[in-house]
Image (tube, rainbow, N blue to C red):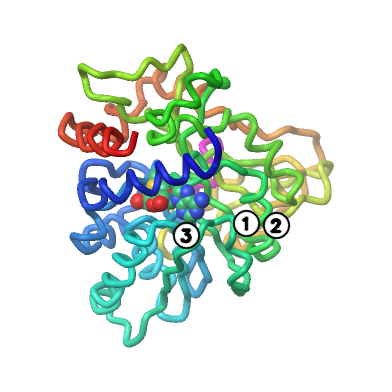
Amino acid sequence: MNEETSQQIVKQMYKTLIESLTLDTRLNIEAVPSYAIEILSKISPRSRKTYDGSAIFIPDAIEGARVLDIGCGGGSLSFVLSKLVGPAGYVVGVDFSEDFIQLCQEETAYHMKEWGYSKPNCEFICSDVEKLLDFQLEPFDVIVSNGLMCLVHNKGKVIQIISRLLKEGGEFYNSDIFSDTKQCEEVKATPLFCCYGLSGAMVWSDLKELTGPYGFSDPYLLYAADTFQFGTEKNKLDLRGVSYVCAVYRLIKLVPESTGQGAIVSYNGNYEKSQDFLKWDVDTIFKKDVPIKIDGYFASLLAKTKFARFFTFEKYEGQLISKRNQNPFSYLKELRESGSAYPKPIFPMDEEHNKYYEDAIKSVI
Ligand SMILES: C[S@@+](CC[C@H](N)C(=O)[O-])C[C@H]1O[C@@H](n2cnc3c(N)ncnc32)[C@H](O)[C@@H]1O
């Protein structure tokens, strides 16, 4: 299926689906800090009814930051970010669906009133993400993408654009559907798979190959969980043995200088929203005043990010390699084996919601 056809299908599907999805049943609440849950509960009824993200992830320490939300949909995440960056920060949401952008623009006043801002600190642009450079936007501190990449054809071009729009040392949070192996071409070409984001789901290990050449660090896995069921109970998709997962990765736009000297790093507890611990990825959760040895690559990266101000670094003379579990499938397996896997898929989409999908998909194919 060519790019134009799949884009038309996706646009048409969202036209039908708009306002029949919901944040309420699809929120991966265990990955959201408590302060953000309160903010999420204040998202307007119209925006929350359009939520179709892969898994929400809330970036830390973004007060005053410029944040770009690509594939922003009805703005559930963009408006949470507009609260978190505060009146001095700025959020830009981008989507190629005119209906979604109109909805975000109409809902802006509601959220600005809710957050107590006298003027909007966010704007919404209707554009294909591949044409974003035409808008000559100022560079961003943080870029988030929740469920976009699996719908994008030319992923390399989009990553290059993200890299161009990010400040040096900035963060890219990519929440998406990933597969364990390649899906066969015949299955990929079916519109149904395109609508569910399965045709374009990246094999998880390809992310590093894709982003490295554009100046990104290794991807750090922040979260992984089962996807929802594809299809209603009586109409399940035949996935031909390929598995899918929802995963969130953090990538930093910089390449660490050294892989040599490690460090002993302590979290000082001075990030006011999370004083007891700071999570870097699924393998490294820094607890306040508990020193952790990290390898040279990680130490050099961390020292150059905005997070450095929360840590004390000491030299470590020995050799070591920090664990970097980037495979969301093996992380999920570990969680299951230790009995701490999330009890339910993150998206306990009920039959009714799955039926909305099927009806929307039927209307476009
Ligand atoms: C899975 S939805 C996620 C929406 C939103 N992030 C959320 O959490 O509700 C993906 C979004 O990406 C948008 N999209 C898909 N391809 C796009 C493209 N090439 N350029 C801009 N937006 C795109 C769709 O219109 C849709 O709103």
Magenta-span inclusion, residue 162: no
- The residue that disc 3 covers is 69
- State the CA–CA distance, disc 2 to disc 1: 22 Å
Q: Amino acid at mark 1?
A: Ile
Q: Are marks 2 and 1 in contact (CB under 8 Å)?
A: no
Quarter of the image holding residue 86? bottom left
Around disc 1, counting alpha carbons within 10 Å, would you say few (fewer than 14), some (14 to 19), or many (20 or more)? Answer: many
Q: Give coordinates of residue 55: x percent, y percent.
A: 39, 43
Front-most of residues 300 and 185: 185
Around disc 3, counting alpha carbons within 10 Å, would you say few (fewer than 14), some (14 to 19), or many (20 or more)? Answer: many
First along the sequence among labels 2 and 1? 1
First along the sequence among labels 3 and 2? 3
The reply to whether the residue tagged 3 has its Cβ within 8 angstroms of ligand 1 is yes
**Residue 176 in the image: above or below residue 309:** above
Magenta-span inclusion, residue 283: yes
Name the residue at 37% across, 55% down.
73
- The residue that disc 1 covers is 162
Around disc 2, counting alpha carbons within 10 Å, would you say few (fewer than 14), some (14 to 19), or many (20 or more)? Answer: some
- The residue that disc 2 covers is 303
Front-most of residues 275 and 194: 194
Left or right: 359 in relation to 211: left
- State the CA–CA distance, disc 3 to disc 1: 11 Å
Which quarter of the image is occupied by the C terminus?
A: top left
First along the sequence among labels 3 and 1? 3
Q: Give coordinates of residue 235: x percent, y percent.
A: 25, 19
Name the residue at 32% across, 67% down.
102
Q: Which is more foreground, mark 3 or mark 2?
A: 3
- State the CA–CA distance, disc 3 to disc 2: 26 Å
Q: Residue furthest bottom?
A: 118
Name the residue at 49% across, 26% down.
189
